[in-house]
Amino acid sequence: MRAEIRAANPDPDLNSNYSEDIEAVPGANVTVGMRLGEDSGPFVAGGAVTYTLDYANQDMVQAEDVVVTDRLPTGMTFISAVIRQGGGITVLQPTVSGNLLTFNLGLLEGYQSGEILLRVALAASLTPGQELVSRAGISTSSEESYSEDNSVEDIQTVISDEPNLWVSLNSGGDGQLGGVHYYSLYFGNSGTRPSSNVRLSLTIPAGLTALNFGLTPPTSLVGNVATWEIGTLAAWSWAEPLEVIGILNAVGPMTSTASISGSSSESFLEDNTAEAVNETLDLSLPVIAGPESAVIGPRPAFYGLGAPGATVSLYLSTTQSVPGGLIGTGLVNEEGTWVVTSTRTISPEGWYWVTGTQQLREHTSAAAGVVNYMTSTLPFDTNSLRRSGERMGGINQPLGWAPLTTYPIEMRLTECAEPLTPTLQALFFNDQGLMTGYQDFPAVSMTDGTLATFEFTTPDVETSFELFVLYYCPLNNPLRSTHVQRVTSPGTPRYPMASAQGPIDEIKRYYRCITSLGANCQPAPPPPPPPPACPGCTPFKPLQRPKPTDPDGFVYDAAMVEAGATITQSVITNAWVTATQQSGPGQFAPWNALEFEQSNPQLTDGSYPDRVLRPGYYSFLVPPGKYRIQARAPGFLPYESHIIEVVNTPVTLHIPMRRSSGNQTEVEISQQQRLYLP
């Protein structure tokens, strides 16, 4: 409809002189549905079943000449039908043509509905397992506004007229030594006849002890077989599940089998047994994830990951001036994180070795990898490897670095007694924070098997660099051998990095030397510009960095998503996610998040101090370059992404994690320190 106004006088705006309204002409909308009737019998040969055909007009317009049809499958014959509409029930006789039934309903008012109760017989010649497909339809001579819901079909399967016992076995738990494990037995009778003298049994692995059977203890427990005498199970019935809970006290695979039987005959036995296969891992080492900061108090708070419910104990290694021993314990929460504040003041200043174990019930893990910790008032390392002749750990370094100079770099290799192929790796960065190259420096000597010495030559001026020490611990290590697991460089989070951070580190980014801190300032060739306030120093400011962008995404349990859950319903809240940046062909190293005031790695618990507060979610804002994303979580296989090329558009990468089924055969250790050439 269009309305318009006109006048004899001139009109400056003709666009407002008319109006239009468009309305669609409504039509009828008939629908049909099909379901089994409430009084339907089982689909057995020679029996009878009932269908309910629901019909309706879902629009306000009348539907004329309404017809409902039902095409029966071979093996079904019509017995009777009644129609229920408007509160009354009337016998309805269809037109029968072969296996096609036609019901003429006539006029159907707007929003009127009803149902046809159809009873049919099943031929005695039908065989168990045969499918019966019934198809219903509805039509009208009136114009319809929507016709996609005018047909429906129902599929049923012929079953045997006898009992059909079934059992299902679910299992789960912590999955590691000392943890809780449970079995849930579901069972019933899906047949058409009752089953007598039903017996249910479960073989319990020998490694599961301290058994608890909940509210329904077994009738007998002989050896490792529990048996329940159920009695009679009626047709179409099921019972409350039986529970078995215990403590895992043996490492390795374990198999449990459930079976159900009765004295009544049944022909289908494939669902009378069920099996659950699980693997118990050794109690894992706790992860000491921090602190990584070099400016912390004399009673530091350490934090990391562990087994929920376990107690983490931290120990300080003995030196000539500091006695070692227990420095604190803490409980691992349900999310698998823990915090332990040292009960002792750790002094004098310098590097210290901190190790940790976790205890779960009667089991204690091996000692975790060493974390290098530096006390408060020494914010930047000054040859801390040695103090009064003691070996203190960490990568030693001079405070003032000169360009194109060779330095002896020492590192105490603390993870195992016989470290192999120690290598000092230097990664080089430009002023924009992008990696430009790398170089490996093999150890030139080893003292008492654990003190490695490398010869490192610094690059030219205006180049910052990172130093890594990498080595391997073989499987047959003696004392201090780490847990058998492969960890890729840089070993985060199982072997946390010893980072050089803090306010002095920030200052060193912008000035080539700091004389007040005792730096050995050497003028760079060619001669520097006019001297600033610091004699002998040449201040500089890095070039403006490119605008950072993603990757980000969720870390989730792949098995849950494959079972039908959404990603946000399946997030993992104790995963460590690390962004690595390409340093050369096929070479990746951790991205330096400190330059962009971020944390790398990030913990997906929503509260770890990385400012990413959404559980299960990680987010890095990185400059342009090529990256890989790594993820690790207790009980899951390590994940590493394909190469992600970041340019200037957002990148979303959701990380699917799969459950771990065992450990590998080699350990790779990496300890890192970020340094800046003055």
Image (tube, helix red, strand yellow):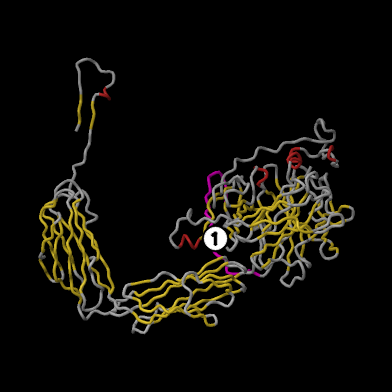
- Decide which of 658, 204 is in the foreground and name it: 204
- Decide which of 565, 429 is in the foreground and name it: 565
* Label 1 residue SS: strand
In the picture, residue 584 is in which quadrant? Answer: bottom right
- Decide whether the magenta segment is chiefly helix, strand or loop: loop
Vertically, is 377 above or below 265? above
Where is residue 274 shown, x and y percent of the image? 45, 76
| Amino acid type of the residue that numbered disc 1 sits on in the rendered structure | Met
Where is residue 642 shown, x and y percent of the image? 57, 57
**Residue named by callout 1:** 657
Vertically, is 351 above or below 9? below
Vertically, is 126 above or below 431? below
Where is residue 306 shown, x and y percent of the image? 64, 59
The C terminus lies in which quarter of the figure?
A: top right
In the picture, residue 281 is in which quadrant? Answer: bottom right
The N terminus lies in which quarter of the figure?
A: top left
- Decide which of 656, 660 is in the foreground and name it: 660
121 left or right of 244 in image: left
414 left or right of 138 in image: right
Look at the image and say whether residue 647 sits in the magenta stretch: yes
For label 1, the crowd category at 10 Å Cα-Cα, with few meaning under 14, some 14 to 19 and many 20 or more, is: many
- Decide which of 334, 650 is in the foreground and name it: 334
Look at the image and say whether residue 560 sits in the magenta stretch: no
Where is residue 143 shown, x and y percent of the image? 16, 49
183 left or right of 635 in image: left
Give the residue at the far top of this rendering.
9
Instruction: Specify start and end residues of the magenta stretch as a single range.
Output: 645-664
Could you tell me how many numbered marks the image carries? Answer: 1
